[in-house]
Amino acid sequence: MEDTIRLNSLQPADGAKHAKRRVGRGIGSGLGKTAGRGHKGQKSRSGGFHKVGFEGGQMPLQRRLPKRGFKPLNDHLYAEVRLSDLEKLPVDEIDVQVLKQAGVVGQQVRYAKVIKSGELSRKVVLNGLSATAGAKAAIEAAGGSLNAAA
């Protein structure tokens, strides 16, 4: 019965608990006199504290850095194209340049992805464009094909 745990015999493991360091308790403790605070200055005094991030009056780092939200810097390079947009285009071979000329995407766009929104009833060939799984299935169902981005 010795190996069972009893509430009245619980205790920490050997070496788990050690005495807290007592500062300012004489020269023999190693932390007497200034009690590890050094000499002079705001931090040596009682009540001598400052708020987190305070840099002595210098403009703090969090205020020196610019405010940048969650908008990606390269967001303007990517665009989404609907299947209904492809349906309206007069050409069968479609790439990013064709989409720019038709005004479907902006002039700065480099990469476009076709999403399954709307219907596609004619055969189109996409060059250098990516597509979602649903859009790819719809394009292939209409007899079209997708050539991967080079």
Image: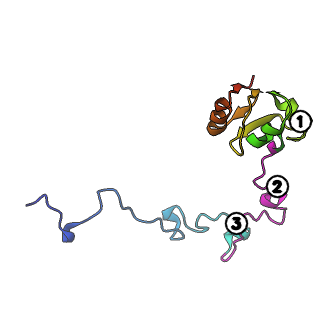
- State which tag comes first along the sequence, 2 or 3: 3
Label 1 environment density (alpha carbons within 10 Å; few <14, some 14–19, many ≥20): some
Q: Which residue is mark 2?
A: 65
What is the x, y in percent for residue 10?
23, 66
Q: Secondary structure at mark 3?
A: loop
Q: 106 or 117: which is nearer to us?
A: 117
What is the x, y in percent for residue 106?
88, 41
Q: 50 or 44: which is nearer to us?
A: 50
Q: Is residue 27 above or below residue 117?
A: below
Residue 5 horizontal side relative to residue 132, left or right: left
Residue 91 horizontal side relative to residue 146, left or right: right
Under mark 3, the amino acid is: Val
Q: Which residue is mark 3?
A: 52
> For the magenta stretch, what is the residue range?
46-75
Q: Is residue 44 above or below residue 67?
A: below
Under mark 1, the amino acid is: Lys
Label 2 environment density (alpha carbons within 10 Å; few <14, some 14–19, many ≥20): few
- State which tag comes first along the sequence, 1 or 2: 2
In the rendering, which numbered label is found on residue 100? 1
Split into 4 quadrants, where in the image is the N terminus? bottom left
Number of numbered markers: 3
